[in-house]
Amino acid sequence: MSSFNLLDRIAEITKKSEKQTPKQKKILEVAITTFAEKGYSNTSTAEIAKLAGVAEGTIFKHYGTKENLLLAIMVPFLKDNTSSLVDELFTELMDEKISFKQFIRNLLKNRIEFLSKNKEIFLVFFKEFIYKEELKKELIPYFLEKAAPRLKEVIEIAQKRGEIIDKPVIQITNMIATTIAGFLITRFAILNVDSVNDNEIEEIVHLIMHGIGK
Amino acid sequence: MSSFNLLDRIAEITKKSEKQTPKQKKILEVAITTFAEKGYSNTSTAEIAKLAGVAEGTIFKHYGTKENLLLAIMVPFLKDNTSSLVDELFTELMDEKISFKQFIRNLLKNRIEFLSKNKEIFLVFFKEFIYKEELKKELIPYFLEKAAPRLKEVIEIAQKRGEIIDKPVIQITNMIATTIAGFLITRFAILNVDSVNDNEIEEIVHLIMHGIGK
Amino acid sequence: MSSFNLLDRIAEITKKSEKQTPKQKKILEVAITTFAEKGYSNTSTAEIAKLAGVAEGTIFKHYGTKENLLLAIMVPFLKDNTSSLVDELFTELMDEKISFKQFIRNLLKNRIEFLSKNKEIFLVFFKEFIYKEELKKELIPYFLEKAAPRLKEVIEIAQKRGEIIDKPVIQITNMIATTIAGFLITRFAILNVDSVNDNEIEEIVHLIMHGIGK
Amino acid sequence: MSSFNLLDRIAEITKKSEKQTPKQKKILEVAITTFAEKGYSNTSTAEIAKLAGVAEGTIFKHYGTKENLLLAIMVPFLKDNTSSLVDELFTELMDEKISFKQFIRNLLKNRIEFLSKNKEIFLVFFKEFIYKEELKKELIPYFLEKAAPRLKEVIEIAQKRGEIIDKPVIQITNMIATTIAGFLITRFAILNVDSVNDNEIEEIVHLIMHGIGK
DNA sequence: AATGAATGAGAATTCATTCAT
DNA sequence: CATGAATGAATTCTCATTCAT
């Protein structure tokens, strides 16, 4: 996995994965499960082929390289992750339909729901992510550029409304991001939960809004 | 890495690694650096040998297997992590010398200092940890048994003193653990920072104690 | 390419290749170009299919095996090479219409023209030829039987006329063959020229007839 | 065989091949024989390993890649080919010890002797050479720069002495090179002779000096 | 204690060929 | 006729591990 021109590769790969044969789907399915469980490096294409009931050559006919198979898993996940679903939340808050607390609650619920549905792919992604400096260098700035400005607006509005403290926006963002990321990573990547109940969500919302001090 | 009787192996390995020759030290040094950077699976013993200026055989003379080399890195780290240094913090709080907030601050500072000093070993550990179900099954209960009761005491005292909210101890523990783990993981495993300044620590302390709500 | 009963196969293949569909022609075209450039072994049928804008199966529908595709290229070339066009030259000389020198000049021009037109196929042929002992064993005697007797006649006539030295015919043949083969191989297979100008032809004719001594 | 920085690689490879183990020698021996017979592309490393009585891994331990094994064969051959032995011939002629004809005779004998001794390596080299445009682009200029100037001196001296015709030096060089190359290629690469007897050499010398005309 | 040559079991990948549509 | 998904054997290469010195 030498060069990682993510955005260049997306086009390439998504094109190929338009019309999927049943075997192709099965390969992807098996790859997701095994990559999620044992990680990309510790899974052999022979193993995937066997579990998918397919000849090893078939994998390479469709995906060219093992790495492309990984990208075929990760790319749609990354695209979905930046989906417009999140946008609605921002709009709702800005339209004064919901409080900031409710916004955080909805954001958390939305992200948790997304990860619950895509738990395995998230694991595939996360396990690779912490290894690949290039991946980080491409994705972290990308998300910062996309997510941070949106969040900034929301935070400023909430501050004007007097809902949250008056610290610099970047610090607030940082706190929220750390808490949510920490929550999602510990739950899905470390504790391997399958879903999160509403109580727990409520606790995190409380934590973000009020902490544990009296 | 088939069976993982961690506690059984610790004795075995720590014995061996008592008297270290210079070559042995060099091997360990190089192994830590490369495992941290590229992960255990993606590092070959040949590479370690070359970087350590040692013959391939030498690694196996000392560590027997590649996996044992990994354990020789992780075991002392895990032992240190549960070291008595942490105990002092608890004592201090319980002796009413410090507030709960100060306790959290000190706890954070202590853990951050520890990880800053052992950043690479932490990465080696963390990158393996998220893969190995066996590791998790051994270590998570182990820490819960050790850390949770201590924390419980502290929390109860703080609650009595009226410093923190009256939710169930387990929920409080959860919140604290999530926030601290989230903070440490995002900083050291994702953002690859080398150290954390006091401002940032203060923010997290504030977050834990008061959240971001007004 | 196991057994190489060339003459037996010629009939088989030439029959099949009588009525060529456009796709078939395109396959042949692409195969010639890529075989010439990279050699038979280093060209995959997948590559040919892609470059020809044809499905992989189509190649095998028409040519059965990759080897047959090679033969379909080489066989017509070999047939043309022994064509009656050469015969005229012999007749001309024997009819005293031209000198031996002119005969050599015309022979050279004719062969150069043929190879210029079929440069790629010649390369395909030559690159395989030097590998395949079987090919050599079939073709070298074949050409000796066909070409040598004709040349013998010509040489004897020229010797009678006093145009060339009185060494044994076989030695003269050898010298001519070596020089012409050497010229053609160095130009077309090594230096990759596209054509040869008349000056250069004249030099070779001079070389064959008079050498470089004074 | 993507990039071919021949001169850069020579250093690398010759270093490695200093101290050869018996197995390493055997691998080289077998590789030469099989590459010569069937060509580089048509020989698998598995086959070489088997014939050499060695594990396949051993080949890669020593040579890294199959291509490096090829270079380990070709590089010493190319270095020897440009050896100072040839220089003596030039000196002899220029010291008026020998005639130009004798120079050509000695040159031919020397080259034939060299190729007879290294016939298989020559075949390995030649078979690759005609495929690899990069090899040609590096070696042809290299030899032109080294050989042509030396030859030029010799030819000019011979012309002054009145031993050879007064055509431009480049044309004379061309004629000599074509004849000698043609001779060597047809004999060693096409007819697969093991050695060349003196009669045949004498014929070629005659051809070069006097041609076949009367 | 240290070396490094040698191993052989896999790993990823290629490729000619088949076959159902 | 033509397709292209699927195959599986072969190929190059990797790597932890062993062992004679």
Image (cartoon, coloured by chain):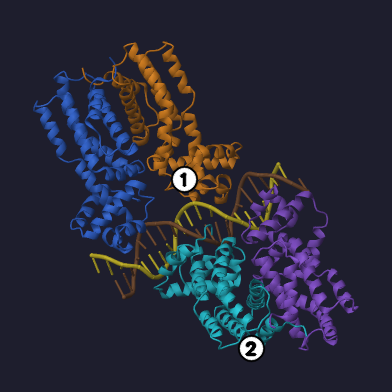
Chain colours: A cyan, B purple, C blue, D orange, E brown, F yellow
Q: Residue at x 51, y 43 (%)?
A: D69
The kind of residue tagged 2 is: Asp
Residue picked out by circle 2: A198
Q: Nearer the viewer, residue B134 or C201?
A: C201
Asked if residue B199 lies left or right of residue D27, the reply is: right
Q: Position of residue B114 (x, y in %)?
A: 78, 65
Asked which secondary structure carries label 1, the reply is: loop
A139 and C100: which is toward the camera: A139
Density class for disc 2 (Cα within 10 Å; few <14, some 14-19, many ≥20) is: few
Q: Amino acid at mark 1?
A: Ser
Nearer to us in this view, A40 or D62: A40
User: In terms of image quadrants, where is residue B71?
Assistant: bottom right
Q: As displayed, is residue A184 above or below residue D42?
A: below
Label 2 – label 1 distance at C-alpha? 60 Å
- The chain that hosts pointer 2 is A
Q: Chain of mark 1?
A: D
For this view, does D25 lie left or right of residue C204? right
Residue closest to the far right: B95
Query: What kind of element bears circle 2?
Result: helix
- The quarter of the picture where residue C61 lies is bottom left
Q: Does residue C19 appear left or right of residue A162 in this picture?
A: left
| Quadrant including the C terminus of chain C | top left
Q: Residue at x 45, y 36 (%)?
A: D121
Whether residue A143 is situated above or below residue A99 in the rendered picture: above
Q: Which mark is residue D3?
A: 1
**Residue A87 location, x and y as percent?**
51, 79
